[in-house]
Every structure is written in structure tokens, then in C-alpha cells.
Amino acid sequence: MSADADFEQITVRDNEGEERYEARIGDELAIQEYARQPRRVSLIHTEVPPALEGHGIAGKLTRFALDDARARGLEVVPACSYVAAYIRKHPEYLDLVPEYARHLVPGGAS
């Protein structure tokens, strides 16, 4: 990966066939895996290659996933600890989490 990679211009896409959101930077691929049901999506796992850590990529993936869920009218089950922590820090997304799953968001059981 080049040292001048522009981390502000990262494009996230929904790879529905693989059930994951993806952000490709150079030869590296960051992903957020999900399981989508008719009325909800479970965000299961976020993975950023070590070479890409510290550039806000996991946050970009998560924001994209949450905005996508909102646009689709889906509830979000934050099974991934990163997603749960992100929602706690960005409470504007807490309304996507159904009551039965709020215990997964530390400090977000309001």
C-alpha cells in the first residue's frame, strides 16, 4: 500500500453475495460481516487489516452499515463488539437497535 493513500476517499460497498460490507484500499480489504433477515440485520464481525488500522476505516464501515440499515428500514443487532461501542459513542443510531438487543450496547440501554 502506498504511503499517500487517501483514507478520506474510502468507498464502502455492500457485497450481498458474501454478506459483508467492504472497503478496499490498495491490495488490502477491510470488511464488516452481516446476516440480513427480512426485518433486521445482525452486524457480526468487523475486520481491518493491520496495515490499515488507525485510519477510521472500521468507523466508516460501521457508519455505512448503520445508514444502510436505516435506509432499508431494518433493525440492527450489534453482535460485533466494535459496532456496539460505535453505537454507544454515536447515540443517533441507538434507535435502530430493538429493545431486546439494547443490552449489547454498553451504556445504551435507554
Image (cartoon, helix red, strand yellow):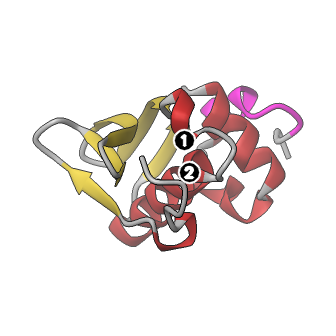
Which residue lies at the image location 65% right of the left edge and 26% below the top edge? 81
Q: Residues within 10 Å of mark 1 (few under 14, many from 20)?
A: some
Residue 60 falls in image quadrant: bottom right
Answer yes or no: do the residues labelled 1 and 2 have beta carbons within 8 Å? yes
Instruction: Point out residue 10 in the picture as x, y percentages from the top left corner.
Output: 44, 65
Nearest the viewer among 56 and 27 is 27
Q: Is residue 74 left or right of residue 52?
A: left
Residue 106 falls in image quadrant: top right
Which residue lies at the image location 56% right of the left edge and 71% below the top edge? 8
Nearest the viewer among 13 and 70 is 13
Residue span colored magenta: 101-107
Q: Is residue 65 left or right of residue 102?
A: left
Nearest the viewer among 38 and 79 is 79
Which residue lies at the image location 82% right of the left edge and 39% below the top edge? 109
The residue indicated by pointer 2 is 57
Q: Mark 1: which amino acid?
A: Leu
